[in-house]
Image (cartoon, rainbow, N blue to C red):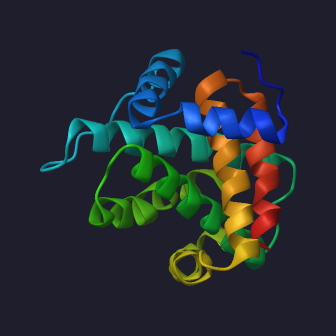
Amino acid sequence: MVFGLFGGGDQLTELRSSLSKDSFMEELEKTIKAFGITPTESQGKSRVYGEIEATARFLFEQVMQVAVSAKIIKSAKDVDAAATLAVVLVQCFGRNGDLGKSDCRILQGTVPGFVFPRTISAELNAQTSVALSKAIVRYTHQIKQKKFRKNVEAVEDNITQYLTHRKPEYYSSLAGDISRFL
């Protein structure tokens, strides 16, 4: 079945339901192979943790490079929104990869902590620790609100489609998703 970049609602529902945890891991493995991603090795962490961390870093770095080049990231508010996108990305990967809450919390800091210094200006990078704290608190408290949850679901749909299709066009789609969290 072929899905468009912004597939219809029925297609997304079918895609989401078709990606069970096993399917997610299969698609993650294919993505790792397709892009030559090297899983990280953290003492005391599982192989899946390393794969998820490396893939989340890779995807978020690509999205941030597109966002910076498109001048989407210009202010501290934009960094806050990008940090929220990183939290959503980690939560999506962690939940579907069966990571525990503590592992997801660790990745919520390490993934953007790795990517921000590599992609944004030093001036904006100085504000990332505050942005990460805000993003984690925001996600925790606002996920129960309908509007925020719909935005999270839309981002997760784009992440799912990226994993399924592995096309670089989704980087710009996810970069545009940063504005959902402004």
Along the horizontal axis of the image, is 140 left or right of 4? left
- Left or right: residue 151 versus residue 104 is right
Say which residue appears at 31% left-offset and 52% top-offset: 99
Depth order, front residue of 109/170 = 170
Task: Name the residue at 51% across, 76% down.
Answer: 136
Q: Is residue 14 left or right of residue 141?
A: right
Rendered-image quadrant of the N terminus? top right
Q: Taking 125 as reference, is 33 above or below it? A: above
**Residue 164: percent from left, percent from top:** 61, 26
Count of numbered tags: 0
Q: Quadrant of the C terminus?
A: bottom right
Residue 141, by quadrant, is bottom right
Q: Position of residue 98 (x, y in %)?
A: 33, 48
- In front of the other: 40 or 17: 17
Residue extending farthest left? 44
Name the residue rendered at 76%, 50% in the picture: 175
User: Toward the viewer: 24 or 40?
Assistant: 24
Residue 73 visible in the displayed image: no
Residue 8 appears in the rendering: yes
When the figure is inspected, residue 122 is found, relative to residue 165, above or below; the finding is below
Establish if 5 lies above or below 143: above
The vertical placement of 47 against 146, above or below, is above
Residue at 76% across, 17% down: 2
Q: Based on the displayed image, in which of its 4 quarters is residue 116 positioned? A: bottom right
Q: Position of residue 69 (x, y in %)?
A: 82, 46
Estimate the x, y position of residue 159 in percent, counting from the top left.
63, 42
